[in-house]
Image (cartoon, coloured by chain):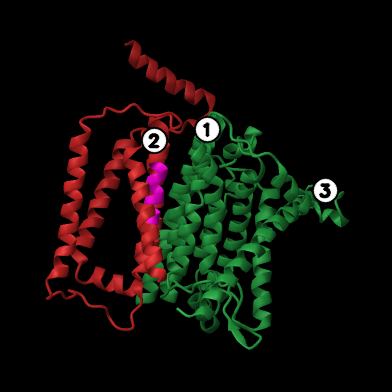
């Protein structure tokens, strides 16, 4: 392993960590603004022009607040739970190609940390580990509402994971590889996968909402209980880490959906790179849009939806794809 | 060098995690350490170049341990210590040492002999996932299918055991229907 590769990888890891931590903060600003405009409010306005410095103010607040560990909690698990959510979100980013390869000062840069040939499995698997954060945080909190929230986290987890895997299986069969770069290259020649796999696209998209715990399936931190579910006992930056993990996950899944189904960055020109960023922005915006437009479902409705509607559809889709590819 | 560092780091972490799993009296510690240990094991697959199995290890065991957490939540107050019956500690220690020595002996025995060869050598040019697929769907097809049937049996049995009143859903019934079902139940108790 030569030094250039090592230095390049370390730089890439640091850049991804910094960019997406910052984006997670800016994401909260966008969420508040978009929600505000859809609900005919103004959103953050007071701090800086258009409330842009609100992100910094929130950051300072989270970093300087006292980090309270209540006396009844299981302290080691309670402390480590937010780290799991944030760390696994960023670990999943290792196999995502964020931009096409480009040349910088005569050195070819691949904006992906590790092009392992099981990319999609790795991304989905490690993202799924992130749900241990809410689960452990809720169970360690010694709080009834937090425990209920942890139970819902387990329910969400066992519902959506099968759907995600089966929905992604049909495109994987067509491409014949698990690497996200191969997905992109396949779509340069054969057109976007969404035209041949519209059902898988919709199923994967719905499951992505459950995976990131966004609004139609925002039942882990149940807003109806007025308190914040697993986050009830948390304060300061530990609570902030849950948030960073959630928003980083939203950004990463917004990259993964276009790369699998919507052509990714295409043939790797500057236009293709901007197209990928544009698609990512649309999917991120869609997360916020649904939050403004839709109510939450109940846990039993989510399980009913995932196991009785989405999973059979996904299985049928896989079988049909198999037959079409065979004959 | 990196492989050696990664191996010793993850070996230490895995053994520590499973040690905590076995020795702790608190359900939450045991479950969390079990999950962490299972995920750290995947690192060995990645070090050996078996990327596919590593990812599968992560996916399968997060799901499995998540189900264990659900049971733990139902059976224990996970923030309190569970009272355990401790038998003779020396027997436990002695048996563990004997078992560990035997495992090491079994797995290190082939190293001494020289006529070691792979039953199913690597196919040139095939990726990791394809390698697993080729072996699984040719040499190990029958065990694979038997495992599938076993899982199907388990699933059917689970549905039969759990699904006695699956057509009833309290959340989808209105008040009169719930009352009627209650009356039905009470009638059985009273008569």
Residue range in magenta is B31-40
**In this image, A26 relative to B150: left or right?**
right
- The alpha-carbon separation of the residues under discs 1 and 2 comes to 14 Å
> For the residues tagged 2 and 3, is the chain the same?
no
| Chain containing the residue with disc 2 | B
Q: Give x and y (percent) for residue A289.
A: 69, 54
Q: Nearer the viewer, mark 2 or mark 3?
A: 2
Relative to B30, residue A183 above or below: below
Q: Earlier in the sequence, mark 3 or mark 1?
A: 3
Residue that carries the numbered disc 1 in the rendered image: A73
Residue B167 makes an appearance in the image: no
Q: Colour of chain B?
A: red
- In three-dimensional space, the C-alpha distance between marks 3 and 1, rounded to whole angstroms, equals 41 Å
Q: Is residue B137 above or below residue A206?
A: below
Give the crowd class for mark 1: few <14, some 14-19, many >=20 residues within 10 Å.
many
**Which dot marks residue A40?**
3
Q: Main secondary structure of the magenta part?
A: helix
Residue displayed at 19% across by 75% down = B118
Residue B78 place in picture, x, y as percent: 43, 32
Q: CA distance from mark 2 to mark 3?
A: 48 Å
Q: Give the colour of chain A.
A: green
Labels 3, 1: front one: 1
Query: Which quarter shows the N terminus of chain B?
Result: bottom left
Residue A172: percent from left, percent from top: 43, 70
State left or right for residue B65 relative to residue A294. left
Residue identified by numbered label 2: B27
* Residue B11 falls within the magenta-colored stretch: no
**Does label 2 lie on the same chain as label 1?**
no
Q: Is residue A320 above or below residue A39?
A: below
State the image quarter where residue A191 is shown.
Answer: bottom right
């Amino acid at each position: 392993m030569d030094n250039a590769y090592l230095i390049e990888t370390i730089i890439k890891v640091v850049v991804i960590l910094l960019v997406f931590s910052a984006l997670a903060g800016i994401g909260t600003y966008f969420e508040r603004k978009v929600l505000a405009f859809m609900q005919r409010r103004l959103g953050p306005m007071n701090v800086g022009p258009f409330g842009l410095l609100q992100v910094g103010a929130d950051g300072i607040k989270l970093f300087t607040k006292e980090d309270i560990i209540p006396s009844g909690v299981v302290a080691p698990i309670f402390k480590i739970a937010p780290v799991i959510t944030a760390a696994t979100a960023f670990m999943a980013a290792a196999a995502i190609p964020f931009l096409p390869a480009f040349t910088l000062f005569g050195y070819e840069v691949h904006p992906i940390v590790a092009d392992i040939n099981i990319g999609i499995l790795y991304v989905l698997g490690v993202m799924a580990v992130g749900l241990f954060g809410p689960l452990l945080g809720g169970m360690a909190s010694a709080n009834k509402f937090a425990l209920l929230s942890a139970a819902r986290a387990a329910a969400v987890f066992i519902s959506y994971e099968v759907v995600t895997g089966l929905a992604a299986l049909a495109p994987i069969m067509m491409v014949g590889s698990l690497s996200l770069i191969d997905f992109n290259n396949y779509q340069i020649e054969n057109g976007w996968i969404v035209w041949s796999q519209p059902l898988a696209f919709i199923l994967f998209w719905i499951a992505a909402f459950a995976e990131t715990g966004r609004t139609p399936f925002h039942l882990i931190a149940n807003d109806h209980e007025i308190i914040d579910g697993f986050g009830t006992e948390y304060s300061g930056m530990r609570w902030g880490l849950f948030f960073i993990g959630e928003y980083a996950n939203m950004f990463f899944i917004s990259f993964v959906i276009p790369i699998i189904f919507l052509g990714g960055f295409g043939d790797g020109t500057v236009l293709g790179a901007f197209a990928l960023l544009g698609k990512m922005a649309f999917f991120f915006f869609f997360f916020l849009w649904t939050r403004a437009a839709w109510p939450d479902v109940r846990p039993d409705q989510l399980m009913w939806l995932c196991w009785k509607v989405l999973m059979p559809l996904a299985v049928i889709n896989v079988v049909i794809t198999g037959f079409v590819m065979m004959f | 060098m990196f492989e050696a560092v990664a191996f010793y780091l993850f070996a230490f972490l895995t053994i520590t995690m499973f040690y905590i799993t076995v020795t702790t009296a608190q359900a939450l510690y045991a479950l969390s350490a079990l999950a962490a240990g299972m995920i750290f094991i995947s690192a060995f697959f990645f070090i050996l170049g078996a990327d596919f199995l590593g990812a599968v290890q992560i996916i399968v065991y997060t799901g499995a341990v998540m189900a264990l957490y659900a049971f733990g939540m139902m059976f224990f107050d996970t923030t309190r210590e569970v009272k355990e019956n401790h038998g003779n500690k020396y027997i436990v220690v002695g048996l563990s040492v004997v078992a560990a020595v035997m495992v090491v002996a079994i797995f290190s025995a082939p190293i001494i002999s020289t006529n070691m060869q792979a039953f199913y050598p690597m196919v040139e040019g095939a990726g990791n996932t394809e390698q697993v697929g080729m072996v699984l769907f040719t040499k190990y097809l029958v065990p694979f299918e038997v495992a599938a049937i076993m899982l199907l049996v388990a699933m059917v049995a689970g549905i039969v055991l759990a699904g006695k009143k699956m057509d009833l859903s309290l959340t989808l019934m209105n008040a009169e229907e719930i009352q009627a079902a209650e009356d039905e139940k009470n009638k059985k108790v009273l008569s």
